Image: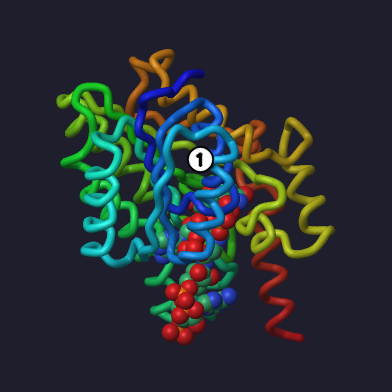
């Protein structure tokens, strides 16, 4: 894949899966902009992306819950790098918690980051997306369509993200902008996976639920993003692409209840 001369913006691109995506675009010669809350993580990522081969890299620290800060950051990215060819929106927060046990603010926090954060990012970037030819990739999660106990907040937020993908593929598709979601399965070594499967037993249960029999890697997800952003996918829009080793075909599986059982037994203990 050759993204030389293209501008790629990755929000939440400073660790885990999203950083893997940013690194893949960097290795393909793109100009990159990354953002997350921590300036330290932004600086570290800028250095890594330069080393990976990016033509140019800039970054900014902001919280996706702050619509004005997001808009200002995206304006700064546009002034420096020009129209956005690719926008990856992937900032997210997650923790296992049963609905009866979590506060309203806990639920709201995840919705504010995952769902409203996506709204702020997409609306902030809208004036700067290349027309025709702009590409949006929302990073979703299996919780969008598979219910997992202990994940009501994430299930609600990510389902919203995917419905925004489908809706904007129509609203913005008429302007020549493609909008897709990518759903990573369980991706090894990531913060999200550590939070959902904190013990080796939970990790093994999770692996057994995956028909392909292995955890995914950030590179697996990045490959799908490179494809979706490329001309090879020029007629693909409004799709929710699972990169999950066929996890979805088995449904929530035992893992759907496991987290709930774990949380309930912790409460008893
Ligand atoms: N169980 C139940 N409630 C929890 C919780 C947990 N494990 N962790 C946080 N909360 C609650 C807090 O108690 C608070 O609610 P309260 O005000 O009623 O007490 C609310 O959630 C907000 O927590 P806070 O720590 O103030 O939020 P934050 O904005 O500093 O951090 C998080 C956001 C909680 C999502 C944090 O985990 C985060 O920054 N995550 C980013 C990384 C991540 O989650 N990566 C995986 C992506 S899949
Ligand atoms: P991660 O390493 O914690 O990545 C989250 C990124 O978002 C970080 O760069 C983080 O940086 C940033 N971020 C978090 N809250 C933010 C906020 N309020 N404002 C701005 N930036 C914020 O997690 P990950 O596990 O790789 O997950 C990445 C994405 O993949 C998420 O969208 C997640 O839902 C999705 N996903 C993950 C898995 C998995 O197995 N890990 C599975 C399915 C889907 P800062 O801390 O500096 O803000």
User: How far across and how far down the image is residue 266, in percent?
Assistant: 72, 80
* Residue in the foreground of this view, choosing between 33 and 162: 33
Residue at 19 percent across and 26 percent down: it is 131
Q: Residue 184 is drawn in which quadrant?
A: top right
Residue at 45 percent across and 32 percent down: it is 55
User: How far across and how far down the image is residue 104, in percent?
Assistant: 40, 79
Residue at 71 percent across and 51 percent down: it is 189
Q: Is residue 54 above or below residue 73?
A: above
User: How far across and how far down the image is residue 203, in percent?
Assistant: 77, 54
Q: Is residue 157 above or below residue 129?
A: below
Could you tell me which secondary element the residue under label 1 belongs to?
A: helix
Q: Is residue 166 above or below residue 5?
A: below
Is 80 on the left-hand or right-hand side of 193?
A: left
Is 148 on the left-hand or right-hand side of 238?
A: right
Q: Residue 103 is drawn in which quadrant?
A: bottom left
* Residue in the foreground of this view, choosing between 93 and 157: 93
The residue where tag 1 is placed is: 22
């Amino acid at each position: 894949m050759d993204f030389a001369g293209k501008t790629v913006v990755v929000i939440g691109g400073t660790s885990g899966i999203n950083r893997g995506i940013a690194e893949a675009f960097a290795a393909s010669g793109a100009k990159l902009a990354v953002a997350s809350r921590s300036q330290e993580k932004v600086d570290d990522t800028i250095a890594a992306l330069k080393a990976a081969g990016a033509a140019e890299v800039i970054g900014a620290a902001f919280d996706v819950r702050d619509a004005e800060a997001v808009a200002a950051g995206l304006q700064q990215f546009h002034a420096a790098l020009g129209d956005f060819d690719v926008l990856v929106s992937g900032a997210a927060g997650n923790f296992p918690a049963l609905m009866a046990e979590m506060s309203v603010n806990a639920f709201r926090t995840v919705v504010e980051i995952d769902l409203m954060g996506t709204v702020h990012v997409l609306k902030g970037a809208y004036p700067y997306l290349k027309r025709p030819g702009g590409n949006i990739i929302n990073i979703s999660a299996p919780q969008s369509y598979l219910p997992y106990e202990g994940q009501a907040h994430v299930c609600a937020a990510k389902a919203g993200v995917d419905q925004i993908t489908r809706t904007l593929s129509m609203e913005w598709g008429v302007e020549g902008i493609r909008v897709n979601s990518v759903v990573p399965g369980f991706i090894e070594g990531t913060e999200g996976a550590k939070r959902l499967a904190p013990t080796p037993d939970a990790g093994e249960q999770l692996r057994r639920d995956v028909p392909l029999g292995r955890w995914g890697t950030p590179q697996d997800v990045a490959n799908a993003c490179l494809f979706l952003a490329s001309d090879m996918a020029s007629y693909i829009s409004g799709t929710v692409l699972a990169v999950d080793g066929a996890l979805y075909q088995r449904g929530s599986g035992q893992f759907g209840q496991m987290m709930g059982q774990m949380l309930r037994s912790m409460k008893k203990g």
